[in-house]
Image (cartoon, helix red, strand yellow):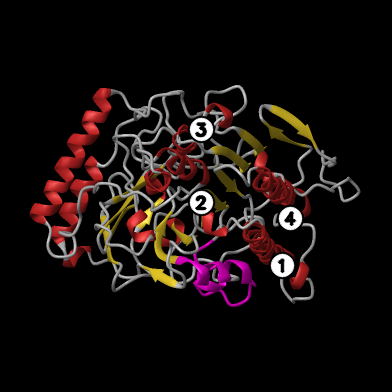
Amino acid sequence: MRSLLPRATTRRLESSRRWLNRAVLTLLGWLPVGLSLVSAPAAEAAAPGEPPNIIFINADDLGYGDLGCYGQKRINTPAIDRMATQGLRFTDFYAGSTVCAPSRGVLMTGYHVGHARIRGNHKPDMPLAPEDVTVAEVLKDAGYTTAIIGKWGLGEVDSTGYPTRQGFDTFFGYQSQIEAHNFYPEFLHRDGAKQPLGNKLASFNVAEKRVDYSHDLFTEEALGFIEENKDRRFFLYLPYTIPHANNEGGRATGDGMEIPDHGDYASKDWPNPEKGRAAMISRLDSDVGKILAKLDDLDLSTKTIVFFTSDNGPHNEGNSKSTFFDSNGPLRGIKRDLYEGGIRVPMIVRWPGKVPAGKVSDYPWNMCDVLPTLAAIAGTPAPEGIDGISVLPELLGEKQPPHPPMYWEFHERGFSQAARIGKWKGVKRSIDGPIEIYDLDQDLGEEKNVADEYPQIVEQMSEYLHGARTADPNWPMKKPARKKKNPTKK
């Protein structure tokens, strides 16, 4: 068993603690009402009674506005909408990043992206390290059987980051996000070995054989895992790959929203990529329904807490446009933006008899809180020094301390930062650019930059953004590369 220590060195841990102390003192001492409510992490509560099974479902590129319970009008999501009536729906939950790999790294380790090992998508060969402590390790050490079924993206088979080296007893799915761009792969990974499938897709010709749609295989595998482990405590991490675009197939067919059929949307007068996007979301919804029905059938619903969320905001890929279904709802921005639409995502939690049913919470929290929250649910300590806090009290309808500041950074298109502190959102789109300030209580769509009206908030946000990250040579703060001009024709 590996020690439940943070992956940082002692020097880095002390640096992080010094930053936290400074930031909290700064915020408590200087900021006006609203920001003064920020507090340091409180002592973690434990779940009542016997620790439950845990299922964490993570959609891929599902937007804040893509579900009926979050305002979607044209895509049918009855199972997830019903899950919201049976549990607790959050309006202010945030992904760990605005793109895939770093968001999943935050989820696994409890570090926000300013302290995490993996902070972007453009270093696909960077895995988690042996000293990283994942939520799977924490739960495995607490007696859980652990599995990941779906998309990993934090280390390939010959690396230290492979899931079976990071606390998972079993793995079935894609080892990298690049592999996951093909929804009809010729193989998937099972515990370190390639499992051949029935697909032959070298050139994506329509005559080639496409029989095994990976998403369907994940649902089948998940249902089997639940059945097999019905008499033991389990943690199932189910990172689905839809409604991400199939970038491989889309290059050849012009339709990167690949799915076996368009279902209820086949007769719609919509472009095919939009039919595909809607069909993906409805297929995802149907399979979430199958997972919940399986728990009901096995009399496991009251013994299982289920989370449903997304890894980042909606995309403009695969020839599909997020505006077609208003996938970001009332929010500004999409995937790869640090505005709310890129990082605020759905979060629904169901645990009958424990989590209040039919409630809506505006408590702000994010993916780095998942590890300490699941640890508290399991009745085991989380690693020291991580950025997340347990939000179990909020899940149980109890008093939850205000959340500490939340931080994001993004390394594509140069370097940008964002933070939420109380009701205030700060966005810094470049190293030497100004800080934009938005009052999320009054301006959810981030339409009015009020930086000129609140210079003190700008000052405090600047102080926070400056101290919220640890320098890392792999993730330097840099300006975007200049585009080369075409040479003058002679």
Dot placed on the residue nearer the N-terminal end, 1 or 4: 4
Which amino acid type is marked by label 3?
Lys
The alpha-carbon separation of the residues under discs 1 and 4 comes to 10 Å
Q: Are marks 1 and 2 in contact (CB under 8 Å)?
A: no
Foreground mark, 3 or 2?
2
Residue drawn at the location 43% of the way across and 48% of the way down? 97
Residue 67 visible from this viewpoint: no
The span picked out in magenta is 63-88
Q: Quadrant of the C terminus?
A: top right
Q: Residues within 10 Å of mark 3 (few under 14, many from 20)?
A: few
> Which numbered tag is attached to residue 311?
2
Which amino acid type is marked by label 2?
Asp
Residue 363 location, quadrant: bottom left
Q: Where does the image place residue 480, in percent across and percent down from the top left? A: 41, 42
Dot placed on the residue nearer the N-terminal end, 3 or 2: 3
Which amino acid type is marked by label 1?
Lys
Q: Residues within 10 Å of mark 4 (few under 14, many from 20)?
A: many
Q: Which residue is mark 3?
A: 123
The alpha-carbon separation of the residues under discs 1 and 2 comes to 22 Å
Q: Which residue is mark 4?
A: 258
Dot placed on the residue nearer the N-terminal end, 4 or 3: 3
Residue 73 visible from this viewpoint: yes
**Residue 174 lies in the magenta-colored region:** no
Residue 75 location, quadrant: bottom right
Which amino acid type is marked by label 4?
Glu
**Residue 83 lies in the magenta-colored region:** yes
> Which numbered tag is attached to residue 275?
1
